[in-house]
Image: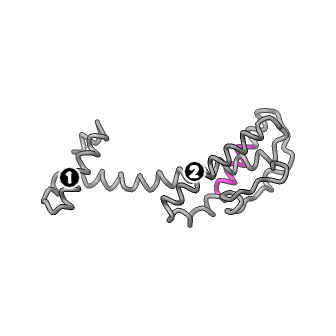
Amino acid sequence: MSDLYETDVAAWSERQSALLRRVAAGEQVNEHIDWANIIDEVETVGRSERAALQSQIAVVIEHLIKLQASPATEPRNGWKESILRARSSIEANLEDNPSLRRAVAGMVRDQTVRCRKTVRAVLALYRERALVEIDGLEFTEDQVLGDWLPDDAG
């Protein structure tokens, strides 16, 4: 069964789900189930949902920083649109995975540090001077997940 997992994960998945249904119905097919890879896949699902949430939080924070720090005027509406889309994805992810909500505050802190570095590099790439001290920008969970935009970004 591990060979199929390595060569065609879709076929492996279909086979394993059929076997698990048979086990749930009381059949004795345990020896055909690829437990090690099933466990890995189940763990991967959780990590994937967490990574998706973290990625969308990073998008919001990066663009909130850009709205406050970048002197550029043209991409501002694009940043706002990106924030709206990412917030919608975050909301959907948290509805589907409410247990991830307790990780949001930590993700906001961690991603703020990473996004500051990214925005500094992007500003340098465009030879822009930050309008505010990027390291002084902090965001709350409510600011990242809610409707908040910086005052000059309204």
Real-space Cα separation, disc 1 to disc 2, in angstroms? 33 Å
Q: From the viewer's perspective, is the residue at label 1 or at label 2 nearer?
A: 2
In this orientation, which residue lies closer to the viewer: 133 or 78?
78
Q: In screen coordinates, is 115 left or right of 90?
A: right
Dominant secondary structure of the magenta stretch? helix
Q: Is residue 112 magenta?
A: yes
Mark 2 and mark 1 in contact (Cβ < 8 Å)?
no
- Asked which colour scheme the image uses, the reply is one colour
In this orientation, which residue lies closer to the viewer: 24 or 105?
24
Quadrant in which the N terminus is drawn: top left
Amino acid at dot 1? Leu
Question: Exactly how many numbered labels are in the figure?
Answer: 2
Residue 5 placement: quadrant = top left
Q: Residue 69: image x %, image y %? A: 81, 46
SS for tag 2? helix
In this orientation, which residue lies closer to the viewer: 45 or 110?
45
Q: Start and end of the magenta stretch?
A: 109-119
Residue 106 placement: quadrant = bottom right
Give the label on residue 19, or none: 1
Kindly identify which residue carries mark 2.
Answer: 89
